[in-house]
Amino acid sequence: MAQHPDATMRPRLRKRRSAVAIAAGVVTFGLVLTGCTDASDPDGEGSFDFSGKEVGAMSDFTVGTTFKATEPVEFSMLYRDHEAYPLKEDWPILTALDANQNVSFDFEVKPRSDWAQARSTVIAAGESPEIVTVSYPGEETQFVAGGALLPVSDFVQYMPNYQDKVEKWGLQGDLDNLRQADGKYYILPSFAEILRPQYTYAVRADIFTELGLSLEPKTFDEFAEELEAVKKAYPDKFPISDRWTDADPLGATLNFAAPSFGTNAGWGYGDGTWWNGSEFVYTGATDEYKNLISYYAGLVSDGLMDPASVGQSDDQAKAKFANSESFVIATNDQEILTLRSALTEVGNTDAEVAMIRVPGGPAGENLQAGGRLGAGILLSSKAAESEHFKALLQFVDWLYYSDEGLEFAKWGVEGEQFTKSGDTRTFTADWDRNGLNPGAPKALNVDGGFSNGVFMGTEGSTSDLLLSMAREETVDFINDMVSTKTQLPSAPAAPLTDIEQEQASIWRTALKDHVWQATAQFITGQRPLSEWDAYVSELEGLNLQQYIDLVNSAQKRQADALAGGGDEK
């Protein structure tokens, strides 16, 4: 992608005021659309009338075409501002988009620390910018009833790169699971060609090697045996003192461990439902969930895991690891660098830290959760009223879904931020990311705006780009996980109506709060597992059955509509 000769020009960019006036009402989307269709229409029948809405649009935009608006266009964007790389008006990504795509932005900036609430406030007020960034599948559901969001499934037929990725990577089934009760979906998620597992345990490899222990335990039972050996050698220490647990009990750890036990948990607990192959059941009441919790309760009772793991702060857990008070802690492919630095800072330069492949469990040795749809964007229903609506669809399609746009958003401008020889990319002298170019004065995200979750799905891209900035150990970990483990199948869609969603939300919240409380109590031993049946009865008293009946009814309704071949909308 060529850089404009005047790369220092100031982009046409405005930051909107963060204060939002409450609108008189949200535009009803049905008044905007005429004869549109969605991606489930295999014949592509129906169309949207773009009359008066093609300013800046290209007439020959297709897969492989570099998008450049035929005249300058400005798109409004709700921007999630990351504290580690706050928005700068002179970022090269913005000057390049202005020069090469003829695109600038009217930003409304909200901090990452308050992103979910700020986004909700803006959308509920009916004042949402055209593009709402960094939204995960499922987070859009709360906004559908108000008519503030565009049913994007009606418009992906005008996004050739999007459609190309869906077909090549077999993603249509995943997208169908995003459909709401009206048969449409309202989010444009990021796409990943392959799964990109990130979370597992970090272990003190030097200690494990010293004791003759494997760094590749096949099962969680084998892992527990290794922890027993560590405890025997270091009786005054807890082998594990865990992190990411102050908000959700063992949120990260239970999330990556759960698939091996045939369930979901922690950060992956979701709405609390689990598809058992024939119907939905309530996750927190299943035998599989009990087995998972029992495993970690056993680690605590045997002195293999610090009971403070449930509730302590990240800083406390990391300090124990750095000071060799523990030897195992949850990590990801970036945080492992922080753990190594912490050990070095306390003078332990001989320590070695390694990521292990997630062990198997009762459900099998080779299962992993996760999907290939990640954080993406929402479009305001008002975008369809804009004179540049078609250009907006083309730009979004190019930046978020074309190979060229994805490379640009991640690496920058070829010849400016990086050079390329075949499939190998190399940073130019001034630029760095993740320590790949030590000593370079500029960070790609901080000083360039690239590798920024706002402009690219951090979970989504081609396999080449997903691994292009990863360290060798990260590539090895991902390849090991992907090559040896099978992704658990996705549950079928069970879209609720607006009224059902309102009721389900009340039940769901009360149930999850109780599960969280009991999970922490069971693991730490504050509540004996002999009270499991009593706990399940408590969940039933919180409308467990009514909630599950509602979800199963919605699933059957959706399945019947699809099986009938009719218009499920």
Image: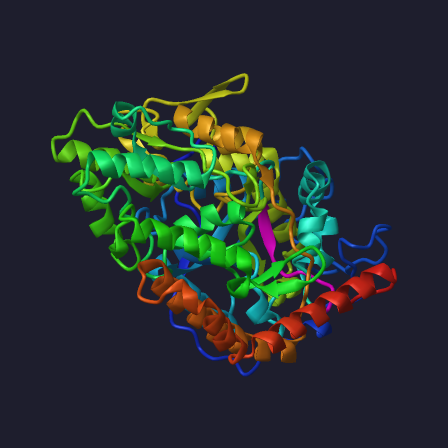
Q: Residue furthest top?
A: 421
Nearer the observer, 143 or 385: 143
In the rendered view, does 4 fall on the left or right side of 329? right
349 to 224, vertically: above or below: above
Residue 219 sits inside the magenta stretch: no
Relative image position of residue 547 (x, y in whole percent): 60, 74
Extreme-front residue of the structure = 530
> Residue 236: x and y, percent?
16, 43
Residue at 50% x, 71% y is: 536
- In the picture, the quarter occupied by the C terminus is bottom right
Front-most of residues 3 and 397: 397
- In the rendered structure, the answer to whether residue 19 lies left or right of residue 135 reads left
Q: Which region of the structure is painted magenta?
A: 182-190
Residue 451 position, x and y percent, is 43, 39
What is the quadrant of residue 114 in the picture? Answer: bottom left
Q: Is residue 557 left or right of residue 18?
A: right
Q: Is 218 above or below relative to 129?
A: above
The answer to whether any part of residue 1 appears in the image is: no
Q: Main secondary structure of the magenta part?
A: loop
Q: Quadrant of residue 559?
A: bottom right
Q: Is residue 187 magenta?
A: yes
Q: Looking at the picture, tell me which residue is in the foreground, 505 or 50.
A: 505
Kindly give the residue lying farthest to the left in the view shown: 347
- Occupied quadrant, residue 554: bottom right
Above or below residue 292? Residue 398 is above
